[in-house]
Amino acid sequence: MINGEKSPAYDAIVIGAGVTGMYQTYLLDQAGMRVLGIEAGKDVGGTWFWNRYPGCRLDTESYAYGYFALKGILPDWNWSETFASQPEMLRYSNAAADKMDVRKHYKFNTKVVASHYIDGDNVWEVTLDNGEMVTCRYLISATGPLSASRMPDYKGIDSFKGEYFHSSRWPTEADGTPKGLDFTGKKVGIIGTGATGVQIIPIVAKTAKDLYVFQRTPNWCTPLGNAPLTAEEMDHIRQRYPTILEYVKSTPTAFPYHRDTRKGTDVTEAERNEFFEELYDQPGYGIWLSGFRDLLLSKESNKFLADFIAKKIRERVKDQKVAETLIPTDHPFGAKRVPMETNYYEAYNQDNVHLVDIRATPIQEVMSDGIRTTDNIYDLDVIIFATGFDAVTGALDRIDIRGKGGQLLKDAWADGPSTFLGLQARGFPNFYTLVGPHNGSAFCNVGVCGGLQAEWVTRMLTYMRDYGLSFAEPSQAAEDQWTTAVYADFARTLMADANAWWVKTTTKPDGSIVRRTLVYVGGGPEYRRRCEEVAYSNYEGFELA
Ligand code: NA7
């Protein structure tokens, strides 16, 4: 207890009603705390609420992502496909919210615009976009690593007469169903070929009169291999829930894959290619996560797989000039998120699909009726921006978060985050960032890792209450040690060579460029081991009062 502290209206405020935020709200309520949730959307679901674009689906196996089913909150849940579609994910989120009865704690259609820590009072004052101000002791963000959508600032963008929108703000009917999925007779442009663009392109290609794909950087994409799940398969999965949960918790990213024990050079070329063929034909992320153990550490091993995938692209795309444009040359395989695709490469064999290399011929402006690049004008009726997100810290940057002495979080993290366990930053007491920077949940199967993190935070807050504590802030030494280790771990991998969404790039006034990882790549098991060590030692590394 801090001298002179005031009683806040709530013990905790949770920002966000995605799968992690609503679970955190539920757990704190169960623990007897007064909790308020704030959510910008009109209902729960987070990423599954916002992303309603055609083709949107999980690329984690549904049963491995669905923590509420694995945990017994939704024991009878039936997944209809190996990789569930967005509508199914939204139904799942809603069913979980019903079962946990969390909506009653939330203010929906409400955004947090500012959160200020008031030193003497030991409270957080949280200002909402309706002008209201609420106070809490513990502020917990569950704003999602990929929620702050990013639109390019092309010249003339507002003059475009057709429809244009970001992929995560797909136009919907009044009942929330996506509209305009039939592009018959329309000329459509899509900008961006990350995981989102790669899901949208083959679907829009089915109906559009012409689809122009404006590609800045190609990605290494591999087949998703989705299929319906039969009732028998689902029964078998359900019987194995405890085993599935324990297994995914034991793997680095909580996906149901473990790495092969061999290095790429341990086998002959023929054995390697046979192994790659097997992985390529498997559904899901096996090719990224269960290949040779040195895939992300050895350039030589990585090139074996990259060459194999390049060969697949050349086989699948008929026009070899187009195929070459689709083959990445700037980053190793798996050093950026590998988009999982369904007929993505085949879409380029359709006469109505045109690949525009905007690295070679950059976009100059958006005009009233299309896009002008350095060598052409493209007439368009619709422009879809699949241009990604200000990842991990973006949603927090958009809130005026001030800690001790009025320090702005955005300024404190200007050169990259500095945290202890990715959960708290010095100067911002009692502020927890779930699935935030440098913690073991953002570079992970969030469905599971976010849930595990909410459970850990609940334990810490319960411990504090039980011991009459109300203040937690990381020590400088603990924060420095954690942050240095996060950056060093990342630098040892080939991921350090790629501009993935989990890398923050800042240009300094002198023109120098600083690149910093936003994620922890030490693996979930090691992360949670460290968290347990901290909990066991009475939260050593935190200054408690
Ligand atoms: P990503 O993976 O960040 O991809 C964004 C794409 O948009 C990528 O191809 C970018 O090219 C492109 N982009 C971004 N800004 C521009 C501009 N200004 N001009 C042209 N092209 C641009 O986001 P996604 O939504 O696809 O996926 C995010 C995650 O969501 C994904 O990993 C899943 O976990 C779910 P670049 O590579 O920067 O040259």
Image (cartoon, rainbow, N blue to C red):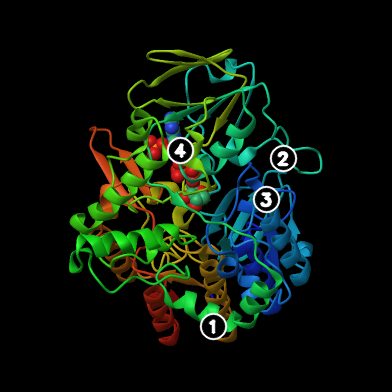
Left or right: residue 59 compared with residue 509 = right
The residue carrying mark 4 has its beta carbon less than 8 Å from ligand 1: yes
Mark 4 crowdedness (10 Å alpha carbons): few <14, some 14-19, many ≥20: many
Residue identifier under label 4: 193
Q: Earlier in the sequence, mark 3 or mark 4?
A: 3
Q: Earlier in the sequence, mark 2 or mark 3?
A: 3
**Mark 1–mark 3 distance (CA, rounded to whole Å):** 30 Å
Residue identifier under label 2: 178
Question: Tag 2, which secondary structure?
Answer: loop
Type of amino acid at the residue the image marks with label 4: Thr
The residue carrying mark 3 has its beta carbon less than 8 Å from ligand 1: no
Q: Earlier in the sequence, mark 1 or mark 4?
A: 4
Residue 82 versus residue 27 in the image, above or below: above
Residue identifier under label 3: 49
Which one is closest to the eye, mark 3 or mark 4? Answer: 4
Quadrant of the rendering where the N terminus is positioned: bottom right
Residue 371 versus residue 134 in the image, above or below: above
Type of amino acid at the residue the image marks with label 2: Pro
Left or right: residue 333 compared with residue 344 = left
Residue identifier under label 1: 243
Is residue 408 something one can see in this rendering?
Answer: no
| Along the viewing direction, whichever of 332 and 532 lies nearer the viewer | 332
| Along the viewing direction, whichever of 371 and 230 lies nearer the viewer | 230
Type of amino acid at the residue the image marks with label 3: Phe
**Mark 1–mark 2 distance (CA, rounded to whole Å):** 37 Å
Question: Tag 3, which secondary structure?
Answer: helix
Mark 3 crowdedness (10 Å alpha carbons): few <14, some 14-19, many ≥20: many
User: Which quarter of the rendered image does ligand 1 occupy?
Assistant: top left
